[in-house]
Amino acid sequence: MQFNLKTSSELVKKLTNKIQLGEENHIARISLAYSLAKGATYDSDIPTDSKQKEYKDNTFFGNYKDYYISLICQKYQIHKDDTNVKKYLKWHVDKGLEMIDMFFEENKNVSGIEFLLDHIEVGIDNINENEASFDFVKNKNVSIKEKESFVEPVKILIGEQEGKDIYFTPNNTSIYGNCHMAIAGQSGAGKSYFARKVLERIIAESKGQVNFLYLDFKGMTESDKTNSDYKAFFKTTNATLIDTPKDSFPVNPLSFINNINDRDKIVGIGRFVDIIAKYANLGNVQKQHLKDATKLAFDNILDGTYPTLHDILENLYEIAGDKPSSLTQILIGLTEIELFDNSKYGDFINQNYYLSLSGDLSKEVRFTATFLVIYYLYNTFMNMDKVPIEENYSGLRYVLLIDEAHNVFKEKKSQEILEKLLREVRSQGVSVMLVSQGIEEFNQPTFDFSEMCQSAFLMQIKDGNNWKAISKFLGAGEKQRNKINRSMESIKPRQAISNINEFDFGEIFNTK
């Protein structure tokens, strides 16, 4: 059976250019797969433009005609010789083109290659069913209200050169694809001070509408708490210090789970189990015990509230006995010092918090607690509507700042969650700031974190002559090499170079 499918030549050309695919048959194949993956189902023929693009079967299908036909047959439970196969094929191509075009209309700051990589990743996750998946779970039952975004220019003072102030507007979509920022500088270079100043100015520019969570992996010292710079930061931003293990973070980490819809509840429990399993190195038996204990904890709650980690631990003892294990040890570590305030369900996103992660906590407990919070943030914002873009300015809701981020980069267990966060929350109005002592840590074998941060600020670093790492961090080419090398040779504390569009690339400026 020959099909010779026709579809809109205008959309084919437009999207081929957007995604930079080269041959126009690629977008037709992608649109077919995209509409199927998104669950679109034929209802009626889609009106098409007068200008049609026709694909001969060998052009459209290549060597995989049987494969594409089988996708349609499986979707509609029909035989490959059914006369409706051609109709369904055409409809899914047309529908997919419409859906992809709509995606780019709603996400103007997402590039074509990012669109492809994000959806290829989802497909790989679906193939690797035994691997932990950190996709968000639907939860319209959550008590957190939709957080409004600030849709005006967020113009930030970042420094000066020769008495002239330098400003930077990260939510200007005509210049930047996302609001993520990378800041690198060795101890004493002033990177954390600079990061705090950027936060202060975001809060001031947004009139307090944008909120933040500052994650400090090294933890505040007693001298930090009495330091005038820190005092000014807390006063200016009205931020609350959560000093672990003395203070509890104001959220029940299980409250991202939908406790009403059974299907979403099971999926949410699975995500929670995956996070714990990653940091406790659980085997399949322990993982199943944790899943059973968590499900039982939810089943035992009848008043619409949420169970606690302590409830899960008690159930675990009943299911698996009280013999010590890596699973019980991490749950004990999370519960015995009350790291979470289980009576709170996430309203912290409407306030500013500084989470100081004390070195007194074990590494496993610190990372598990941290990524329960990060996943809560990710899941909460992914359940909100995408932020609007008005007059080239993208709405901004929230900033997640991770200080001493090299601790995260080095942990392979943490990279997948952080990668997903960076890729997906940009359309939800969340900016991620990554602050680290060096630049090589940003570039990991499986993922380049600096590549996902549109704006980079480089201060004094120990590996200041590592051109390969610097060029990746700043997105610099050979033409800028000599200039950047000269800058790095003479850069001083509290100075930086950057790739922002509002200032000369690689030129030294004084941070403010």
Image: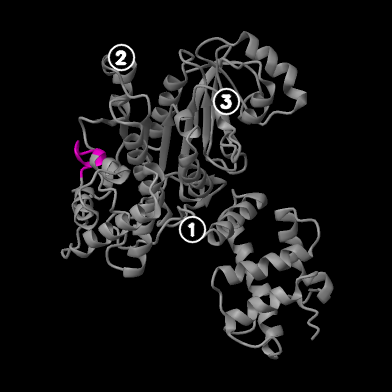
x, y percent for residue 290: 30, 54
Q: Residue furthest left?
A: 303
| Residue 402 to residue 159: above or below | below
- The three-letter code of the residue at mark 2 reads Ser
* Residue sitting nearer the eye, 354 or 158: 354
Q: Residue at x 79, y 71 (%)?
A: 60
Instruction: Determine crowd level at label 2: few under 14, some 14-19, many 20+ residues with C-alpha closer than 10 A.
Output: few
| Residue under pointer 1 | 130
Please tell me whether mark 2 sits on a helix, a strand or a loop.
helix
| Residue 279 to residue 512: above or below | below
The part of the chain drawn in magenta is 333-341
| Residue under pointer 2 | 228
- The three-letter code of the residue at mark 3 reads Ile
| Residue under pointer 3 | 439
Spatial CA span between label 3 and label 2: 29 Å
Compared across the picture, whether 18 is left or right of 44 comes to right
Question: Quadrant of the rendered structure where residue 27 is?
Answer: bottom right
Question: Quadrant of the rendered structure where residue 330 is?
Answer: top left
Label for residue 138?
Answer: none
- Which-is-in-front pick, marks 2 and 1? 1
Please tell me whether mark 1 sits on a helix, a strand or a loop.
loop
Instruction: Determine crowd level at label 3: few under 14, some 14-19, many 20+ residues with C-alpha closer than 10 A.
Output: many
